[in-house]
Image: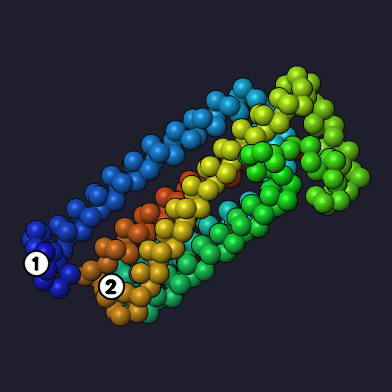
Amino acid sequence: MHRTGELYGQFQTLEQQKESATLGMWTFLITEILFFGGLFMTYTINRHTYAQVFAFSSRTILLSWGAINTVVLIGSSLTMAMAVWSAQVGKKKLVTIFLILTLVLGTVFLGIKAVEYHDKYVEHHIPGLNFDMYYCTNNPSVCHLDDAALAREKKELKEAEDQSGSQVAVNAHSQLFFSLYFGMTGLHALHMIIGAGLLLWLIVESMKGRFTAQYNTPVENIGLYWHFVDIVWIYLFPLLYLIDRH
């Protein structure tokens, strides 16, 4: 396709090209909202149906990791916004610096998420044949439960049993919670990985001095994508980590 500088042949001006690219990105993000919306609706319905078990399952996830990741992502949104601003005013060196900071924060988020997933693996909370919501109460040393935490977990499991009717039901409904947990956070993490790849490309191009006050469309559009992924997490955090926390 014919291209003059950064202007592709089907466009008359860079401004027209930017408007078209931005419209395309917003259209894509709307489809992503519909995509995540189905998962949020599924979660909401089951959360209402199995409230006690979902609440207990949520409390087995470390709140501290989720809170740290929330702060990390908010920080990455700030650095991404600064990268966009730097590109718009033509500060080429700052574009690279803020993009690198955004990538570092995104990597920290994914690293913490990997630690969380490992914890759930150790606790037998990954949906499948080995799933066992009672594993930690039967093996408190493996899950690092002290006497107080063990007593509290047994009490909460008993309450969940009273609502659900049996241990089998508790396991089934808890497995549903963790299926949604891994599905939603895993899909979010996949978007983060894609975003990290896009950031790497931006960093390489910004080091070449490609983005100027006249042309910065890729930085702005990838910034929109990154902010969208951050906003999704802002909803995931209270839904998965904060329900019925006392």
Q: Position of residue 221 (x, y in %)?
A: 31, 58
Closer to the camera in the image, 90 or 122: 122
Is residue 58 visible to the viewer in this orientation of the structure? no
Can you name the residue that lies furthest to the front here? Answer: 129
Q: Type of residue at label 1?
A: His
Q: Residue at x 29, y 63 (%)?
A: 218
Q: Residues within 10 Å of mark 2 (few under 14, many from 20)?
A: many
Q: Is residue 170 visible?
A: yes
Q: Secondary structure at mark 2?
A: loop
Q: Secondary structure at mark 1?
A: loop
Picture layout, residue 142 above or below residue 98: above
Amino acid carrying label 2: it is: Phe
| Image side of residue 176 versus residue 24, left or right | right
Q: Nearer the viewer, residue 245 or 167?
A: 167
Q: Which mark is residue 2?
A: 1
Q: Quadrant of the C terminus?
A: top right
Please, is residue 194 above or below residue 83 in the view? above
**Alpha carbons under labels 2 and 1: distance apart:** 20 Å
| Residue 211: image tag | 2
| Mark 2 vs mark 1: in front | 1
Q: Earlier in the sequence, mark 2 or mark 1?
A: 1
In the rendered image, which quarter is residue 219 located in?
Answer: bottom left
Q: Locate residue 136, reporting x and y percent.
A: 80, 43
Q: Position of residue 32 (x, y in %)?
A: 38, 43
Q: Quadrant of residue 237?
A: top right
